[in-house]
């Protein structure tokens, strides 16, 4: 997303549109109008945030209860509302959220006030070093790097070069026991589907172009990270959605995976 429109209430912002589509209240009229336009043009694009958020909750449980991580660092978090990571993890888990949108950061700090072990900082996910090197974050981590890193619902906004540089930085930063919960956002969606074409145009007009990639492209760009034995899991399987419950139109647009894949990447 372009830096220029992130805190501008005169222009729709994809992060605030996303909040509106999830039923949140931290958005402006201009965002609601654009989100309604998106819903009309491409019904699937308006449903994608919900599935993405459900999958995010699944991973919060998996990372903590099944894989034993007690520190989660989440990049491009959006608002830490009730369905976000910190609500799904056991007490005592440290969650470090971040977002580059100053309005989101301000609201987020209000929402989280007094919540123990949960933090929210401003940071651009394309430059993870900026967040990881913050003195406050270093204070929290106390040299620990055996953590779970999360990039969820944002990678379609990165250029190839940005994604490569994030993957390489995190790989050299992370401890061998770390894990990178990675969302290959919108991978393998139906590129020729008219709804997808219209949604892509709308994001482009907002100054936040989407890069619609194949899963193979994502796998190449995130090397040398490798998925664990589960591989890249289609969103629908990740959350256990029965494909027969989806309409023809949604299936065509969402593509085979259901709007992307998730994976637990390892070193
Ligand atoms: C689609 S939401 C994703 C929220 C959450 N991760 C999820 O999956 O539910 C996108 C959020 O990412 C933020 N964002 C987009 N690009 C970013 C970047 N380069 N760095 C940090 N935040 C970014 C937006 O401000 C917005 O709040």
Image (tube, rainbow, N blue to C red):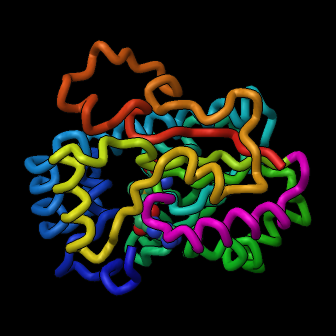
Q: Quadrant of residue 173?
A: bottom right
Quarter of the figure that contains the N terminus: bottom left
In the figure, is residue 254 to the left or right of 154? left
Q: Position of residue 100 (x, y in %)?
A: 49, 74
Residue occupying the point 35% across, 39% down: 50
In the figure, is residue 66 to the left or right of 213? right
Is 138 in front, or is 162? 162
Residue occupying the point 63% across, 76% down: 127
Q: Is residue 174 magenta?
A: yes
Residue occupying the point 67% across, 56% down: 222
Q: Position of residue 260 (x, y in %)?
A: 45, 41
Residue occupying the point 61% across, 56% down: 74
Q: Position of residue 184 (x, y in %)?
A: 53, 48
Q: Is residue 261 magenta?
A: no
Residue stretch in magenta: 155-177
| Main secondary structure along the magenta-highlighted residues | helix
Q: Quadrant of residue 53?
A: top left
Is 16 in front, or is 233? 233
């Amino acid at each position: 997303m372009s830096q220029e429109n992130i805190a501008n209430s005169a222009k729709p912002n994809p992060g605030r549109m996303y909040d509106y589509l999830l039923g949140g209240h931290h958005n402006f009229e201009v965002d609601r109008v654009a989100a309604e336009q998106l819903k009309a043009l491409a019904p699937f694009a308006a449903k994608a945030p919900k599935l993405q958020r459900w999958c995010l909750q699944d991973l919060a449980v998996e990372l903590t209860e099944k894989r034993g991580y007690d520190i989660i660092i989440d990049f491009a978090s959006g608002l830490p509302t009730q369905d976000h990571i910190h609500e799904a993890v056991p007490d005592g888990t440290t969650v470090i959220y971040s977002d580059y949108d100053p309005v989101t950061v301000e609201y987020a700090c209000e929402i989280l006030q007094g919540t123990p072990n949960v933090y929210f900082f401003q940071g651009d996910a394309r430059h993870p070093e900026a967040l990881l090197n913050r003195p406050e974050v270093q204070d929290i981590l106390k040299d620990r790097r055996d953590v779970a890193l999360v990039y969820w619902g944002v990678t379609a906004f990165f250029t190839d070069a940005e994604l490569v540089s994030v993957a390489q930085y995190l790989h050299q930063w992370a401890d061998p026991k770390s894990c990178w919960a990675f969302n290959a956002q919108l991978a393998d969606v139906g590129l020729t589907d008219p709804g997808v074409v219209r949604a892509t145009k709308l994001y482009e007009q907002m100054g936040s172009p989407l890069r619609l990639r194949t899963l193979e492209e994502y796998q190449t760009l995130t090397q040398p990270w490798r998925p664990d034995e589960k591989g890249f899991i289609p969103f629908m399987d990740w959350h256990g959605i029965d494909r027969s419950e989806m309409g023809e139109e949604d299936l065509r647009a969402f593509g085979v995976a259901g709007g992307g894949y998730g994976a637990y990447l390892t070193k």
